[in-house]
Amino acid sequence: MPSKLLDALLLAMPLSPTLESWRQHLLSHLNYPVQGAQSLFIGDPVLVIVSFQLDRAEVLLPAVEWRHHDMQTTKPSSQGVVDEHSGSLEQLLALVEESIALRQKSFHECSHCGQRYPPEELGSLMGEPICRNCLKGRRVLF
Ligand SMILES: [Zn+2]
């Protein structure tokens, strides 16, 4: 299900004060750009997703595909859930940091420009990883 649709549906149900305070903390205290509402997409490119549900927050790693300029998230994998009653904001932040570190490990260097990119933004040219921007200049499709 497209995440925007899911967000629209879920936003009809207000979050509990605890979850809303966690959400606000993530929105204002992370050193990454954050997009989204009920689901927060952290980082650009997206490093980690935090999905707020009725009484818990779930941390997910994205599997992102780019179609033109629209980001599509496919099959994110869950890294864990923090319950608002048994868990804490500290636990959530730790899980987010852990997941970001894991995600960054999956990044590879473009053999052409040397920047690091997530796997979904890299293709290969003669067996070497190459990013979408560099490929664009070469008019190579992948
Ligand atoms: Zn490149």
Image (tube, rainbow, N blue to C red):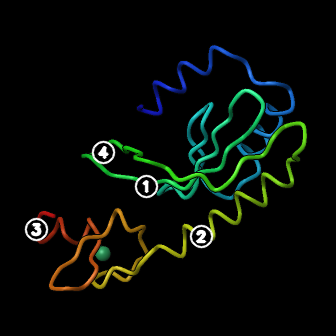
The quadrant holding residue 127 is bottom left
Q: Distance between the residues labelled 1 and 3?
A: 23 Å
The quadrant holding residue 15 is top right
- Name the one closer to the observer, 70 or 15: 15
Q: Name the residue under label 4.
A: 69
Q: Do the residues labelled 3 and 2 touch (CB within 8 Å)?
A: no
Assess disc 1: are there few (<14), some (14-19) or many (≥20) residues with their C-alpha within 10 Å of its C-alpha. some
- Disc 2 marks which amino acid? Leu
Which is closer to the viewer, label 2 or label 4?
Answer: 2
Q: Name the residue under label 3.
A: 140
The residue sitting at 68% across, 31% down in the picture is: 53
Q: Distance between the residues labelled 4 and 3?
A: 18 Å
Q: Mark 1 points at which residue?
A: 63
Q: Earlier in the sequence, mark 3 or mark 2?
A: 2
The residue sitting at 37% across, 45% down in the picture is: 71
> Which element type, helix, strand or loop, lies under badge 3?
loop
- Name the one closer to the observer, 88 or 70: 88
Assess disc 3: are there few (<14), some (14-19) or many (≥20) residues with their C-alpha within 10 Å of its C-alpha. few
> Which element type, helix, strand or loop, lies under badge 1?
loop
Assess disc 2: are there few (<14), some (14-19) or many (≥20) residues with their C-alpha within 10 Å of its C-alpha. some
The circle on residue 102 is 2
Which is closer to the viewer, label 1 or label 4?
Answer: 1
Q: How far apart are marks 1 and 4 (CA)?
A: 16 Å
Q: How far apart are marks 3 and 2 (CA)?
A: 30 Å
Horizontal and vertical percent for residue 58?
A: 67, 44
